[in-house]
Amino acid sequence: MGAVIELSTHGDARIARAREAAARVCDPEVPVLTIDDLGVLRDVRRDGETIEVVITPTYSGCPAMDMIALEVDLALEKAGFVHRKVTLSLSPAWTTDWMSEAGKAKLKAYGIAPPQGRAKGRGALFGVEEIPCPHCGSLDTRRVSEFGSTACKALWRCESCREPFDYFKCI
């Protein structure tokens, strides 16, 4: 669980079990990350017999959210929940500040530079200029394009090892 919010388990074993099932769902665009690593899993609650999982997209037009919602629903079904609901919440807007440190380490090991710093200030809006290469660690890198393989990533290249890499933008 990320440090940003405590999900509402309140000692309820059904909620805890549902949260565990939902937390294992992977991001289809970066399959080494779970939705828990990303901070996309925002809440798990219960209304009578219905378990509701609340997810927040990394940005409002994220094409992966339909697949994530379907995968969460399937995970809940496999965990034995008959009455279930997956809710998409746009507010508050997702931020890279919600990513777990474990998730950032997984990104780096996968070859994607994790977000640098916090999602506040001019650097977050216009991009930072010094991104360490996830392959060799060099700071001799340059931005090739503000847009990478997905809208939440920028394309960079390391001048030391000559490898291109995605940078998960600080949003």
Image: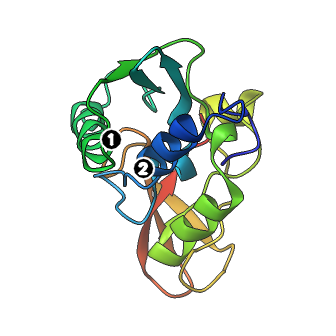
> Between 22 and 131, which is closer to the camera in this rendering?
22
Q: Secondary structure at mark 2?
A: helix
Name the residue beneath numbered marker 2. 21
Name the residue beneath numbered marker 1. 76
Q: Residue at x 50, y 36 (%)?
A: 40
Residue 68 picture location, percent across and down: 30, 39
> Between 65 and 70, which is closer to the camera in this rendering?
70
Residue 165 picture location, percent across and down: 43, 68
Query: In this view of the protein, can residue 38 be seen by the observer?
Result: yes
Kindly identify the amino acid type of the residue bearing the numbered disc 1: Leu
> Between 70 and 107, which is closer to the camera in this rendering?
70
Disc 2 and disc 1 in contact, CB within 8 angstroms: yes
Q: Residue at x 59, y 86 (%)?
A: 136
Quadrant position of residue 101: bottom right
Kindly identify the amino acid type of the residue bearing the numbered disc 2: Ala
Query: In this view of the protein, can residue 145 be seen by the observer?
Result: no
